[in-house]
């Protein structure tokens, strides 16, 4: 199988798994929204956002470093993985205790403390995620994709049974942790057939992992703040009901991150390998990645714009109708995030984590300030606008960082044609089919594709790549 075909196949497998998994998870969210009501769903959203702020700390960038090293030498990384598991186990224990302590000191009601204690048990599964380095490093992503689908379907089944039994949020959080545990143990079982971590504490490797990972933590923590702090602040300033419909907007728009995240599942280990072995292929792969992801990132918000109001009320119910405007704003973050994810990966591969972390930290601070200013007067709309502006600032600043300017120009330049063509296509579609949201959305897609082709957004190398992906030739290719 050609390398181009393998990347496309992995992207399809991971995308398919994420689509089915997200679909199952999204059905769970829809059922919970209707089962719990807008205030009950707001409590669920608050606890999950709170746990997310701490849950990401159990990774601290270790997964990315281990995958990067395993992509270069899987066999030689067995000791590194073992020491990483030791580190993550310690982190999980500390973070779980910290989450409970902070919640208690903050004066959260006993009901929410119970939910945090139950849901936080999932932190102890974090060390097992390092086993998946075996799948990423060999670009064998079918099996973990299948296991992910099965786990999400089981989660859906468990939640439906809990609702049929008339149980509350405590049991719901318990079954969510249970389905996550089944997925983690299954992936660990199959990963151990490919390689086995060496269980020997090595202070030198601990030092190396911490040295390499802490700059990534500076990326992960502020990114997570941008993603979730708005929900914590909304609960405090506007109450559970406003958070309930805002969380519906968040869940709807996050579903569209599936494709860029799936593409990066193949691209990150590949870029790690190319950076060491083939600089020309590294440049070519990143350039093509920016172009395709930017085209996708502009298409999603433009497609959702005419449909947001109908989509929210159809999926979540009429009480969630105020989420329509936040949906459009949050979906617009994909303009920056789709290619921005790849730019962040290039930073990591090239060892520029500190600069990336500083940029996103400034954006996180901006996000907190904007939320503090806008939530009291504009509620959920202010929170969504703060998120959009923060992501935009972070990605543009990352693209303008002088030592990374070559790749930054590639990312920012890849946005110009899609943004201009997207605005024109959406304006024409609204003009032609005003009052018919579905017709506007699909007219946009048709115009967008045609005008991109006319504008020269697709080049000869794109058609050649498409032929290689579709080809069944066994010859290995470097792009």
Image: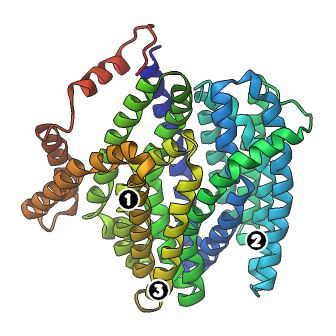
Establish if 75 lies above or below 159.
above
Image mark for residue 236:
none
The residue identified by callout 2 is: 116
Q: Quadrant of the C terminus?
A: top left
**How far apart are the alpha carbons under marks 2 and 3?**
25 Å
Q: Residue at x 40, y 87 (%)?
A: 378
Q: Quadrant of residue 272?
A: top right
The answer to whether mark 2 and mark 3 are in CB contact below 8 A is: no
Q: Camera-side residue: 380 or 95?
A: 95
Residue 29 can be seen, yes or no = no
Nearer the observer, disc 1 or disc 2?
1
Which is nearer the N-term, disc 2 or disc 3? 2
How far across and how far down the image is residue 464, in percent? 27, 20
Circle 2 SS class: helix
Which is nearer the N-term, disc 3 or disc 1? 3
Circle 1 SS class: helix
The residue identified by callout 1 is: 396
- Crowd around label 2: few <14 · some 14–19 · many ≥20 (10 Å): many
Image mark for residue 375:
3
- Crowd around label 1: few <14 · some 14–19 · many ≥20 (10 Å): some
Which is nearer the N-term, disc 1 or disc 2? 2
Relative to 157, 455 lies left or right: left
The answer to whether mark 1 and mark 2 are in CB contact below 8 A is: no
How far across and how far down the image is residue 53, in percent? 66, 66
């Amino acid at each position: 199988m050609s390398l181009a075909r393998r990347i496309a196949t992995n992207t399809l497998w991971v995308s398919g798994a994420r689509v089915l998994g997200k679909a199952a998870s999204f059905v769970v969210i829809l059922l919970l929204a209707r089962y719990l009501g807008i205030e009950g769903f707001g409590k669920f959203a608050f606890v999950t956002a709170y746990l997310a702020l701490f849950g990401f700390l159990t990774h601290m960038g270790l997964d990315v470093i281990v995958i990067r090293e395993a992509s270069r030498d899987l066999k030689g990384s067995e000791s590194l993985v073992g020491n990483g598991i030791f580190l993550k186990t310690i982190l999980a224990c500390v973070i779980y205790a910290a989450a409970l302590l902070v919640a208690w000191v903050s004066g959260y009601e006993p009901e929410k403390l119970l939910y945090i204690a139950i849901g936080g048990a999932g932190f102890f599964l974090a060390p097992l995620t390092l086993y998946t380095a075996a799948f990423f490093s060999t670009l064998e992503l079918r099996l973990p994709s299948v296991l992910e689908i099965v786990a999400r379907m089981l989660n859906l089944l468990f939640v439906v049974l809990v609702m049929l039994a008339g149980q509350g949020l405590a049991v719901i959080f318990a079954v969510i942790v249970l389905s996550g545990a089944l997925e983690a143990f299954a992936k660990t079982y199959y990963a151990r057939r490919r390689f086995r971590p060496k269980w020997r504490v090595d202070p030198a490797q601990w030092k190396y992992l911490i040295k390499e990972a802490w700059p990534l933590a500076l990326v992960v923590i502020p990114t997570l703040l941008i993603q979730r702090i708005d929900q914590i602040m909304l609960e405090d300033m506007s109450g559970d009901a406003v958070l309930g419909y805002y969380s519906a907007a968040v869940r709807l728009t996050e579903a569209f991150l599936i494709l860029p995240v799936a593409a990066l599942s193949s691209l990150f280990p590949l870029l790690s390998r190319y950076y060491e072995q083939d600089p020309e292929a590294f440049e070519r792969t990143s350039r093509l990645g920016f172009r395709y992801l930017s085209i996708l990132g502009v298409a999603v918000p433009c497609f959702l714009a005419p449909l947001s109001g109908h989509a929210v009320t159809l999926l979540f119910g009429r009480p969630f109708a105020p989420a329509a405007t936040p949906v459009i704003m949050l979906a617009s973050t994909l303009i920056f995030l789709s290619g921005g994810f790849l730019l962040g990966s290039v930073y990591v591969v090239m060892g520029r984590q500190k600069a990336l972390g500083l940029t996103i930290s400034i954006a996180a601070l901006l996000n907190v300030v904007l939320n503090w200013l806008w939530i009291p007067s504009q509620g959920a709309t202010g929170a969504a606008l703060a998120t959009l502006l923060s992501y935009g600032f972070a990605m543009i600043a990352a693209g303008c960082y002088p030592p990374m300017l070559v790749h930054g120009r590639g990312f920012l330049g890849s946005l110009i044609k899609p943004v201009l063509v997207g605005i024109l296509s959406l304006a024409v579609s609204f003009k032609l089919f005003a009052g018919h949201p579905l017709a506007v959305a699909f007219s946009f897609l048709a115009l967008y594709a045609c005008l991109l082709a006319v504008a020269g957004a697709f080049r000869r190398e794109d058609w050649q790549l498409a032929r290689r992906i579709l080809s069944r030739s066994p010859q290995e290719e470097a792009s």
